[in-house]
């Protein structure tokens, strides 16, 4: 079998356009945390299940291994800066954007196109990531144009 070159693998994966989401929860001190991801995907309609994956080296790895709940915010096309902020290391970006409170005290962003409040239903360690499966307990849908990530850059969908 040919060895897969990791640069080539990344580049090929980036040819698949995705949306962008910010996943939030609270750490063990009760502080809100959030991370930008594009690994979000739907899994099951009945029961309602979604997934995303976290890098084993993420600074938020321990938080998401411990928490029982998280919220997935699907970003709007005008939230590029927020996506950037929640993908940078030293964060508490909630000081800038504020938040509401959801089920199980989840910190919820004020702006999004959809939010799924989830209970962790399972975690699977695979390679250098852990897949988190969430059972959706609450959702809000505010249809808007999505922020799109493609080939390493943000994009908007044209009219
Ligand atoms: C568009 C985009 C998508 C990302 N997707 C993921 C992801 O699915 N899983 C993940 O663990 N990190 C992902 N990241 C990286 C994290 O957002 C980033 O590494 C983290 O928030 C910063 O914390 P750290 O430096 O402690 O890892 C993504 C970043 C960007 C900009």
Image (tube, helix red, strand yellow):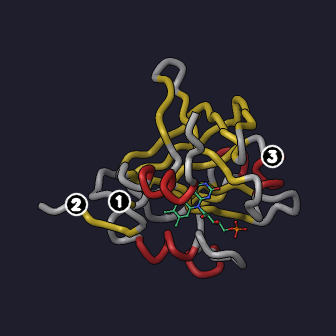
Q: Distance between the residues labelled 3 and 1?
A: 27 Å
Q: Mark 3 points at which residue?
A: 65
User: In the image, ligand 1 is in what quadrant?
Assistant: bottom right
Specify which label sits upstream in the sequence, 2 or 1: 1
Residue depicted at x 36% and y 60%: 150
Specify which label sits upstream in the sequence, 3 or 1: 3
Q: In which quarter of the image is residue 61?
A: bottom right
Q: Does the residue labelled 3 lie within 8 Å of ligand 1?
A: no
User: Residue 42 placed where, x, y %?
Assistant: 47, 34
Q: Mark 2 points at which residue?
A: 157
Q: In the rendered view, does 47 fall on the left or right side of 11?
A: right
Q: Residue 77 carries which label?
A: none
Residue depicted at x 76% and y 52%: 56
Q: Could you classify mark 1 by the number of other residues whose Cα lies within 10 Å: few (under 14), some (14-19), or many (20 or more)?
A: many
Specify which label sits upstream in the sequence, 2 or 3: 3
Q: Which of 42 and 138 is in front in this view?
A: 42
Rendered-image quadrant of the N terminus: top right
Q: Mark 1 points at which residue?
A: 148
| Proximity of marks 2 and 1: CB atoms separated by less than 8 Å | yes
User: Residue 157 placed where, x, y %?
Assistant: 22, 60
For this orientation, the residue located farthest to the left is 159
Residue depicted at x 27% and y 58%: 145
Q: Could you classify mark 3 by the number of other residues whose Cα lies within 10 Å: few (under 14), some (14-19), or many (20 or more)?
A: few
């Amino acid at each position: 079998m040919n060895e897969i070159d990791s640069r080539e693998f990344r580049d090929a994966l980036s040819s698949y356009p995705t949306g962008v989401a910010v996943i939030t929860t609270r750490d063990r001190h009760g502080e809100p945390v959030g991370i930008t991801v594009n690994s979000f995907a739907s899994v099951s309609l009945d029961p309602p299940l979604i997934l995303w994956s976290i890098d084993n080296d993420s600074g938020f790895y321990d938080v998401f291994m411990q928490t029982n709940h998280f919220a997935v915010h699907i970003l709007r096309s005008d939230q590029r800066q927020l996506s950037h902020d929640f993908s940078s290391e030293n964060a508490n970006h909630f000081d800038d954007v504020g938040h509401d409170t959801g089920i199980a005290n989840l910190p919820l962003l004020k702006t999004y196109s959809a939010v799924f409040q989830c209970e962790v239903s399972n975690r699977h360690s695979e390679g250098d990531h852990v897949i988190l499966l969430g059972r959706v307990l609450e959702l809000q849908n505010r249809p808007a144009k999505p922020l799109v990530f493609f080939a390493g850059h943000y994009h908007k969908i044209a009219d």
